[in-house]
Each structure stands twice: as structure tokens, then as C-alpha cells.
Amino acid sequence: KGAVAVTVAVCLVMLLGFAGLAIDIGNLLTARNQLQNAADAAAMAGAGCLIRRTACSNTTATQPDWTTAKARASAFSTSTSTNQVQGAYVSVSTVSTGYWNVTGTPSGLEALPFSPTPNDLPAVQVTIHKDGTNANGAVATYLAKVLGVQTLKASAVATAVLSQPGSVGP
């Protein structure tokens, strides 16, 4: 007669664990998508300022304007009117500028100073973490706490490359 209570108690922990995985992994993926959207938007905002533009106040630039592009991407990523992740604005992001090789050799962003080849194009890269190591906090869990998981980690990286139309292959 008491075996049913014990079985229900054991199964309840397991059911809450599975429900926690379903709900909290879905929440993690939503946060990851919001982080990626924020990083993409900030990288695009910064890349637009690599060239001469009135909107960026760099109409006399003759070379890529790294300083303005980095400042614009950083300001956009931490703006209090854009880029909410789980209902909170992004507080901290890492913005890098340099050259991106469109052929993938070498892969990744080449930091300045760098002597570009024809395949190396100016780029802005934005990284945003939500892992508890900075003011962005971590992704909170709801039911996974039953399994001892208090927080989850997510991050996103976006790179925007400035190129001429048709100069990047498939």
C-alpha cells in the first residue's frame, strides 16, 4: 500500500527533471537566438561606419575608419533602446575590428596592424556572452534546479564584412 507513494515520489523527480530539460533548453535556445540577433545588429551597425558616411561623421576618411566603426558597434550593442535578451538590455559586449579573409585562409578576424591582400576585407566582429562572467548575467533555469542546474551559458559571435557587391563568392 505504501509502495505507490514511494514510486510517485521517485517518478516525480524524474518527471520534473525531464520537464526542466524541455523548458530550460527551450529558454536557452531563445536566449541564444536573441544574443545572435543583438550581435548581428551591432556588427552591421559598426560595419557601416568603416567607409565614409555622413551618418557616421567620418566624411573625410580615406581608409577604413576602425575607431568609429568600433565605437558605433559597441554603442549599438549596449544601447538601452535595442538588443534585449530575456527582457534585459545587453550591458557588455566585445567588439573587434580587423580584416576578414573571404576565402577562409586564414580563418577568423586578423587583428590590426595587418597588411591586407585582395581577399582580406575590413570587418567588425561583435561577441556577446550571457554566462554569468559579466554584467549580462547568465541564462536562468526554472525546473532544472531540481537537478541542481542553477544557470546556463549562452554566447553569440557575429562578423560583418564590408565588400563590394559581387566580390564575395558563393
Image: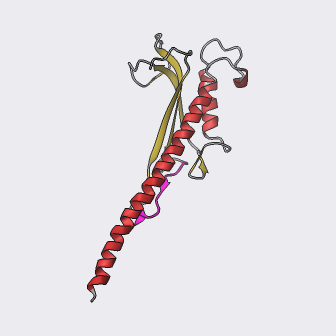
Nearest the viewer among 120 and 14 is 14
**Residue 139 appears in the picture as rendered:** yes
In the rendered view, does 66 fall on the left or right side of 100?
right
Query: Which residue is at a point 41% across and 62% down the rendered structure image?
Result: 20
In the rendered view, does 74 fall on the left or right side of 145?
right
**Picture quarter containing residue 3?**
bottom left
**Residue 93 appears in the picture as rendered:** no
Nearest the viewer among 24 and 138 is 24
Q: Image height check: is 122 above or below 95?
A: above
Q: Image height check: is 143 above or below 157?
A: below
| Image: magenta residue range | 135-146
Nearest the viewer among 63 and 13 is 13
Q: Quadrant of the N terminus?
A: bottom left
Q: Residue furthest bottom?
A: 1
Q: Image height check: is 13 above or below 159?
A: below
Q: Image height check: is 130 above or below 39?
A: below
Q: Position of residue 68 (x, y in %)?
A: 64, 25
Nearest the viewer among 144 and 57 is 144
**Picture quarter containing residue 38?**
top right
Q: Per the image, is 92 magenta?
A: no
Q: Position of residue 123 (x, y in %)?
A: 53, 23
In the rendered view, does 22 fall on the left or right side of 35?
left
Query: Which residue is at a point 65% across and 41% down the rendered structure image?
Result: 79
Q: Position of residue 143 (x, y in %)?
A: 44, 64
Q: How many marks?
A: 0
